[in-house]
Amino acid sequence: MARRDQPGLFSELPDASRRGGRRASYFFALWPDAAVRRRLASAAAALPLGEGGVAYRIKPERLHLTLAWLGDIGRTQVDAALLAGDDVQAKPFLLRLDRSGHFPNASTAWLGPSALQPTLARLKAELDRELLRYGLPVASEAFVPHLSCQRNVRTLTEMPPFEVLWPVTEFALLRSARSNGKADGYRIVRRWSLG
């Protein structure tokens, strides 16, 4: 069953964020602090631009690692997501990013870990469990932790070796606003400290 068709406990009428051509999507993510963001931006800039003439780099201020995509949800579901975030219990950990990759179907190049660390897997499982408990959608596909750094990538050039160490001490719920099909940017709705 597709995520958007998954029934939940919270059905409702569209709210103001979905009227008049302005929409918003919500997602849980690891959101880097300024120092980590600089290191991630440097690694992303070192990844050769994908071939095909139409690839472009994602702005450094938009780099993040998505934990759970909720999509275009209403106010009651946002409140449920906040409750789910409140109930997540996980410890801080050090995330090692050392691999680049390409999702051909999404035409996206990314940076990520070469292996799924148990601490990250536990955070993801804990978050998914709480989302399900509150009747919110959870992806059925395997979790591939990554930071998207290029779009419209047809083929990916080899990435030089790199390593970014990210001390993960929190996760966040973010809102991605769109006007007339164009992204307006991300806004942090709430942060939760780990530990």
Image (spheres, helix red, strand yellow):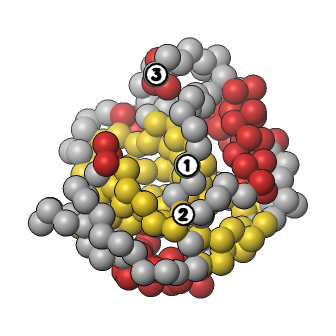
In whole angstroms, how far apart are the C-alphas of marks 1 and 2?
8 Å
Distance between the alpha carbons at the discs numbered 2 and 3 = 25 Å
Mark 3 is surrounded, within 10 Å at the Cα level, by few (under 14), some (14 to 19) or many (20 or more) other residues, namely few
Quickly name the residue at label 2. Answer: 112
Q: Are marks 1 and 2 in contact (CB under 8 Å)?
A: yes
Query: Helix, strand or loop at disc 2?
Result: strand
Residue 108 spot, x, y in % from top left: 34, 55
Q: Is residue 134 left or right of residue 112?
A: right
Residue drawn at (44%, 30%), measured in percent from left and top?
A: 15
Q: Residue at x 23, y 45 (%)?
A: 181
The picture quadrant where one finds residue 150 is bottom left
How crowded pointer 2 is (Cα within 10 Å; few <14, some 14-19, many 20+) is rated as: many
Q: Describe the element under mark 1 as helix, strand or loop.
A: loop
Question: For residue 2, which numbered disc appears in the image?
Answer: 3
Q: Against 180, is 49 above or below?
A: below
Query: Disc 1 designates what residue?
Result: 144
Mark 2 or mark 3, earlier in chain = 3
Closest to the observer, 144 or 184? 144
Considering depth in this image, is 27 or 111 the residue closer to the camera? 111
Q: Earlier in the sequence, mark 3 or mark 1?
A: 3
Eye-nearest disc, 2 or 3: 2
Please identify the quadrant where the C terminus is shown.
bottom right
